[in-house]
Amino acid sequence: MDGSVLEASPLSATRNRPLRIIVNPTAGQARGARLKRSLDRLTAAGTQWDIVETQARGDAEALARALAEAGEVGAIIAAGGDGTINEAINGVMAAQRHGAPVPPFGLLPLGTANVLAGELGIDTPETAAAALLSGQTRKIALGLCETPDGARRYFSMMAGVGFDAHVVAGIDPALKRRFGKGAYVWQTLKEWLALKPARYTLGDGRDASSLILANGHFYAGRFTVAPEANLDDPALIAARFTKGGRLATALYAAALPFGLLPHLPSVKRERITHVSVNGPAGEPVQADGDTIATLPVTFTLAPERLTIFAAPRARA
């Protein structure tokens, strides 16, 4: 099991308590077909489930928190892309932080990158449903991003400041829905052409042209920035990019799909549990593929862990 610790979930003991599945109803026909494949598997196995639909951004978080605090379901499942899943995780963790005995969390991946699903070994409708039916869970570590005003956001896979945060902030949702990963390629090119190098200062005085905090192995799909990162490790991997400008950024982009980015001399990696980041006012911060804040921020390892359904041989 690659070092991951799997546990028996309460799901098998709570068959009379349905799975509550949080779904974005505007996900589209293709995503709807993928969701149906997972639901068909659950139904065939005799599992009870029902759906609650989101209406606007932020609804998945509010719904997940309300469901967790009510304690009337066997599990809370987020069906959607990385953004919907991140929202739901934040709702569950808010309930847990305030003392609620929350049920296990699961996901049915319907997005463009499905990074957390890939890390957990459940990136197809069939494997995602099988993980729920297996009743096997993991307690995974999470990252936490906090702003000076006390706002806090959990993230499961990665957070970033600099070039990748600008790409995420600039992405056109309509293009993303239509072209998927192609929209990110297009936005990356646009950001590269318009690049105005900035420097970001870490709490210890060091600086960087970009910073990525990795909680898991995968990044932006199945790429890697920090191959040593894993969801069971009580630490984040900080990848500090020391060179800036178009040439260095082009090198980073070219190295990423070949697995060479972590090995570049100008990419410095270290294991951390806390780092503060400052820089130009209004600079965006991304986490799990969504803009969540602007600088300054502090990244830490969250004190709580998330109980989540995973495949038996999920990546550690």
Image (cartoon, rainbow, N blue to C red):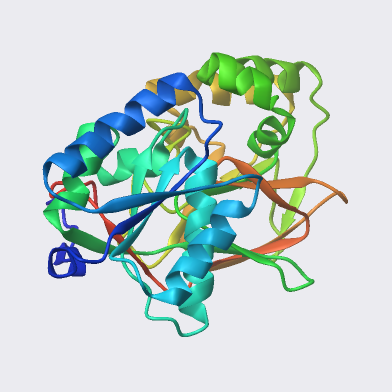
Q: Residue at x 49, y 41 (%)?
A: 82
Q: Say left or right for 142 vs 294.
A: left
Could you tell me residue 285's position as x and y percent?
A: 69, 48
Residue 259 in view (yes/no) = no
Coordinates of residue 2 in the picture (x, y in percent): 15, 50
Q: Could you tell me which residue is drawn at 16 percent across and 57 percent down? A: 3
Judge by depth and name the residue closer to the eye, 137 or 146. Answer: 137
Q: Which residue appears farthest toward the bottom when viewing the image?
A: 99
Q: Quadrant of residue 83?
A: top right
Residue drawn at 57 percent across, 40 percent down: 289
When the figure is inspected, residue 267 is found, relative to residue 185, above or below; the finding is below
- How many numbered marks appear? 0
Residue 6: percent from left, percent from top? 16, 62
Q: Indicate left or right for 32 with 207 as reference.
A: left
**Residue 5 at what x, y percent from top left?**
17, 63
Above or below residue 104? Residue 215 is above
The answer to whether one can see residue 131 in this image is yes
